[in-house]
Image (tube, grey):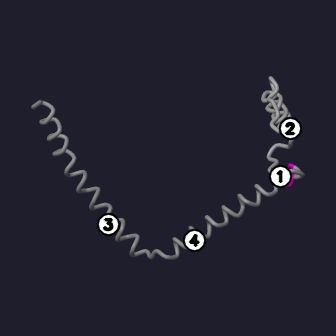
Amino acid sequence: MARKNRPGAAKDTLGRQRAMTMRGAPGKRFVGERARQSREAKRQEVERVVRMAGEHRREELQGTSAMSVLVELFVDSLRLAGALVQAPFRILGAVRRRTET
């Protein structure tokens, strides 16, 4: 059998939920968990992520040689030089198109 909704029942429920949240310890994730346990779990998670990032970075650095870095630097400098040489002509073309219209 269905129950009737009482006036204000939703507000009472929200108020109770808000009070329960405020009574709980900050950072608490599970029922019965203490705040210290939660902080410790977060600290361990951060340490794990930092360790994984460091290992990933070391693997990346081991895979590259000095020669490949120099080749990449040379290719990038050629691209930059080409862009700098073309820039005045592109600006001039844009100004011309703007004055024509």
* Prevailing secondary structure of the magenta residues: helix
* Secondary structure under the numbered disc 2 in the rendered image: helix
Circle 1 packing at 10 Å, graded few (<14), some (14-19), many (20+), is few
Q: Position of residue 48 (x, y in %)?
A: 70, 64
Circle 3 packing at 10 Å, graded few (<14), some (14-19), many (20+), is few
**Alpha carbon separation for disc pair 3 and 2:** 62 Å
**Residue corresponding to mark 3:** 74
- The numbered mark, 3 or 1, whose residue comes first in the sequence reads 1
Q: Position of residue 14 (x, y in %)?
A: 79, 32
- The numbered mark, 3 or 4, whose residue comes first in the sequence reads 4
State left or right for residue 99 relative to residue 70. left
Specify the segment rendered in magenta: 35-39
Circle 4 packing at 10 Å, graded few (<14), some (14-19), many (20+), is few
**Residue corresponding to mark 2:** 20
State left or right for residue 77 relative to residue 50. left
* Secondary structure under the numbered disc 1 in the rendered image: loop
Residue 64 colored in magenta in the image: no
**Alpha carbon separation for disc pair 2 and 1:** 13 Å
Mark 4 or 2: in front is: 2
- The numbered mark, 4 or 1, whose residue comes first in the sequence reads 1
For badge 3, the amino acid type reads: Phe
- The numbered mark, 3 or 2, whose residue comes first in the sequence reads 2
As drawn, 50 above or below 61: above
Quadrant position of residue 101:
top left
- The numbered mark, 4 or 2, whose residue comes first in the sequence reads 2
For badge 1, the amino acid type reads: Phe
- Looking at the image, the residue that sits furthest to the front is 1
**Alpha carbon separation for disc pair 3 and 4:** 24 Å
The reply to whether the C-beta atoms of the residues labelled 4 and 2 are less than 8 Å apart is: no
